[in-house]
Image: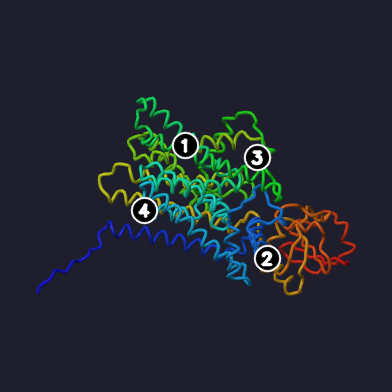
Amino acid sequence: MTGTKTEKRLTPELAWRAAGWLWLAAAWLAGVALVWRFGRTLLDSDMASEMVLADLLNREGGILSSNWYYSTELRVFCQQLLFKLGLLVFPGSWHAARMLAQGLLSALLAASYLFFARGAGLWKSAPWAAGALLCPFGFWQLYHGVLGGFYFVHMAFVLVSLGLAVRLVRPASRARTALTAAALALVCFAAGLNGVRLLMNLYVPLAAGCAVLFLLRFLKAPLGPGAARTPQVRAFATAVLACLCGCGGYLVNRAVLAARYTFLDQSARSWTALSLAGLLEVWGDFLALFGYPADRWQQAATGAVPLFSLPGLLGAAGLVLAGAVALSLAWLLKQGGALPFAQQLTGVTLAACLLVDGLAFACMNDGDSINGSYWLPVAPLAIAAVAAAAEQFPLRRPALRRALAGCLAALVVCASVGTTLRFAAVPPHSSPALETAANWLKEQGYTKGCATFWQANVLTELTDGAIEMWQVEDLASLKMRPWLQKADHASPPEGRVFVLAGPGEINQSLPWTGQAEVVYSDEAGYVVFELNQ
């Protein structure tokens, strides 16, 4: 009996697909490695506050706490839920808990992009784009994404919402359509519970973009009896559903949760004069996300980046990536209906985000407090736009498309390396020397202390929760600040209490120093006083 043996040869196409998944795995591992290497030395109080909150939630047994002063948003579904899990697995090592939570969050973001890409017809480039989304390609992506994790949750909401939306656009059975619509409604409602951010970063721009597509379709030809089956009509109905459910969640946030929990709302914001210069400036902030080494806020916080330094030279890759985003968006919009509808919708939604969010950021009364991080939830759409253009652009040879993708990946690596080197050299709100002071305080048996914001929560995380910190407005008054700490800290600490002064904080007159003694000081400028009570 004779048989044939089928041999599987490793073709260039198969090798390229395998390389994409290896790229995604490498990007995920690199992010976890960054948290392992810098998760303590580059920790700041914004990051640490989420861990302190997660510890409080584990003690209380819930996902929200009335004994916590939240910041400008009540983020119901955010990374503190993963930090809760991390602390349950590693109760004695908050650093290990953070690594686990960030690893899971990065995996969730990658899975969200893959889910979107499958629905949008962008599967060939999906692992490459998902891997790029996990890389620290820019200052805010590293600061509030790879290390802090704040915006990875918002990005995941954007991708899952849009992934469900593009699936609803396609005709399907009634049961499948109903299940997809229900899932979209739940996701949008949950995003609205977090606050107004997703309404601005996706749902309102999506509705605006779909309205334009619907209008263009109507002007091209009157809608007939089968209009409900056209993608433009289905997309507009989907966008309205997303907006309504997102608004419903936000109304619950404002009317129900705001009465029970303490956080600052957005009611103080108002419109100011229309400024085209301001619009161009915030669009510049968006393009700077992709590796440009000195956006407005970063330059003010960490200083100028020398051009002929390694971070400065690698930062040129960020300019090329920003150009790739701009050119990809322009090409998608120019192609219009010649593209598959899901990819046309991706480009239109990105353009609508730039217009809606750009006007909001440029024309609000607190525009000075708005930095490039506000654009991060839109970054996945920009990466998807580049992926769509790379897949659809007519190239005669597949090798050219693979070479283009390889060049883009190399640019992401260059921008990521430059960003990380600069961030590690000049962190915005952290100091490696604080870890030494924290270890000394823990060894001396201190369990309660006071400090200003940028030291307080960091000290608690660095001591794995052994030291509870009261955050104060300033060291002169030692008045409690109602911001990212327990509400019961309104009562001052009792017993053996220390006050930690950071570098430059004891230049002022401190009226209580007569009732305190210096027990620790170092060359970095940290000074510890023990209060005599």
Q: Residue at x 56, y 40 (%)?
A: 200
Lower position in the chain sequence, tag 2 or tag 3: 2
Lower position in the chain sequence, tag 2 or tag 4: 2
Q: Which residue, given by chain and number where applicable, does mark 3 sit on? A: 368
Lower position in the chain sequence, tag 2 or tag 1: 2
Furthest toward the right, the residue is: 514
Lower position in the chain sequence, tag 3 or tag 1: 1
Q: Secondary structure at mark 1?
A: helix
Marks 2 and 3, how far apart in space?
38 Å
Furthest toward the left, the residue is: 1
Q: Which residue, given by chain and number where applicable, does mark 2 sit on? A: 59
Marks 3 and 1, how far apart in space?
23 Å
Quick one: label 3, few (<14), some, or many (20+) residues within 10 Å?
few
Q: Amino acid at mark 2?
A: Arg
Q: Residue at x 56, y 38 (%)?
A: 282
Q: Which mark is residue 406?
A: 4
Q: Which mark is residue 351?
A: 1
